[in-house]
Image (spheres, helix red, strand yellow):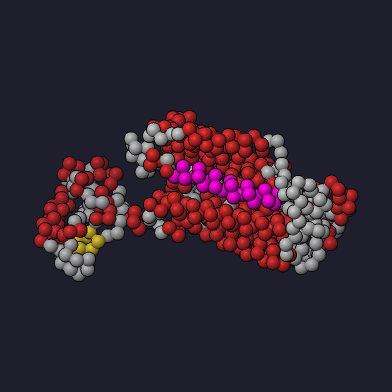
Amino acid sequence: MEDDCRPLLSSEQTGESYSHRGSVDSLDVKVKRPFHVEPRNIVDDDPQERVSAEAAILNSRVHYYGRLTGSSDRLLSPPDHVIPRPEEIYIYSPLGTAFKVAGSDHASKNPSIVTIFAIWNTMMGTSILSIPWGIKQAGFTLGVVILIFTGLLMLYCCYIVLKSPKAISCVDTSNWEFPDVCRHYFGKFGQWSSLVFSMVSLIGAMVVYWVLMSNFLYNTGQFIYNYAHNVNVSDSEFGTNGSDKVICPYPNTDPGRNDTMNILYLGSSGNDTSDGNSFEHYWSKTNTVPLYLITLLLPLLCFRSASFFARFTFLGTISVVYLIVLVTFKAVRLGFHLEFHWFDSTQFYVPEFRLLFPQLTGVLTLAFFIHNCIITLMKSNRHQENNVRDLSVAYLLVGMTYLYVGVLIFASFPSPPLFKDCIEPNFLDNFPTSDVMVFVARTFLLFQMITVYPLLGYLVRVQIMGQIFGNNYPSFFHVLTLNILIVGAGVLMAKFYPNIGSIIRFSGATCGLALVFVFPTLANMISLRHQGRLSLPSALFHSFLILLGVANLIAQFFL
């Protein structure tokens, strides 16, 4: 009687040969050996319907297999070929009914709208803060044209990456990522090169995060200190008057106004008291605050798993939405200030076409960069036939977001009395510390980056340690050494070169050269050649893309 009540699938495992099967709570269908009924054997989808006689015979057969699982001879286990696909699994009830179990793959698939916004959320990073500065460097008209053109190029290269595994017909590429494609076409050189350039993008992002976290933490502490001590710094900052104050942190950027600006510009704090000087000594944007972050973030980087921090990724969406609201509010209050001077700069305006435009292309290369993870993101799309459409819509939304923020900040920047060249690489620096709405934005972004930074560090560790040692966490000493190097790079840049615009453009142009322009286009050309479809115009076009990537990187060193 006791045997009749035992489940069909025994959780008892005898012998060492069963040690790899996992616990009874495992979700592996090969471990559970569930009862399987072909869909045609189910009388109806209603779970209260009885199963057919043929299904009952199959139940007895599987019941027999289940009785053999207690044997130490693994040959008596149910063979793998009788295990159904997840979507064809049914659970047999002692009452004679069968319940269909939805496969895990089906349950994890996302509709198109979720996939589109997942791509949008992944691409929306720190680059959005530098888009207005990039447009200023290129000139308003040329900047808008370059943004649209670069977005289209990045979309096409991303499409090449997405379809690259499917173009390989000789092997199963269902679980491949783009480094696997590079290894297939270019051997070990392609695999390691893609890894190195992927590290450039990740570590570059971590350096930018450290600079921005130092900036946001400094301004947040300054706001709290000024509020607690009733300190008013408005008169010491060169900028506009009124409730929506806009400042020029470094007004000597215009050679024609050096003397006046240097007299008006007294510093970021404006405190003359000894107490204020003492606070500034211990609360400095470049000397102390980047070091304070080490005590918080270095221990977080050493966590073995980053799953805890993944729960806070929603903060990224909230931060971007709030930034859009902030930009809209400021633009409405400030109004538009535009004059079109096509090639010559004036006292308050920059020309529409400037030779500094490669700085914008470098920023945009990282702003539109998602090529190293697009295959993974698209695997979760429920309707794979819509991948190209969903990718295009996602890029359209990203481009519109960048255009919206960049154009509104540039157009609403008050000129005169300020000049457009005052727009900072982080446009939030053009608003005073006392601005409450900007304080909220900085706080949101600070907490978001504190949670995302360990995730980026985890990705760097997994790729580097996995490739070198074959283990994601070889030892605490190895992980600590890697994290100290990464944190040290961030601290040094935050102290000596806290220009996120230049950091973004250099890292974007470097990783974009390999992962956006060279490897995808070469892989596509080789694939087309194997298929006999590589035409002369196609070869010239893809070669032109490679030249653009090379020129984009070289130009960064001459500006």
Q: Which residues are magenta?
A: 139-162
Query: Looking at the image, which is closer to me, 41 or 2?
Result: 41
Query: Looking at the image, which is closer to me, 303 or 389?
Result: 389
Check if residue 327 falls in the magenta segment. no
- The correct choice, above or below, for 166 with respect to 216 in the image is above
Horizontal arrangement in the rendering, residue 542 relative to residue 421 (left or right):
left
Query: Looking at the image, which is closer to me, 532 or 323?
Result: 532
Q: Specify the quadrant of the image occupied by residue 524.
A: top left
Query: Looking at the image, which is closer to me, 277 or 323?
Result: 323
Horizontal arrangement in the rendering, residue 107 relative to residue 150 (left or right):
left
Check if residue 149 falls in the magenta segment. yes
Quadrant containing the C terminus in the rendered view? top right
Q: Position of residue 71 (x, y in %)?
A: 17, 46
Residue extending farthest to the bottom is: 48
Q: Is residue 123 visible?
A: yes
Q: Position of residue 400 (x, y in %)?
A: 58, 56
Q: Specify the quadrant of the image occupied by residue 390.
A: bottom left
Horizontal arrangement in the rendering, residue 515 relative to residue 74 (left or right):
right
Q: Is residue 447 visible?
A: no
- Residue found at x 80% / y 54%: 348
- Residue found at x 44% / y 50%: 388
- The correct choice, above or below, for 376 with respect to 431 in the image is above
Dominant SS type (magenta): helix
Quadrant containing the N terminus in the rendered view? bottom left
Q: Position of residue 36 (x, y in %)?
A: 20, 55
Q: Specify the quadrant of the image occupied by residue 246.
A: bottom right
- Residue found at x 80% / y 56%: 418
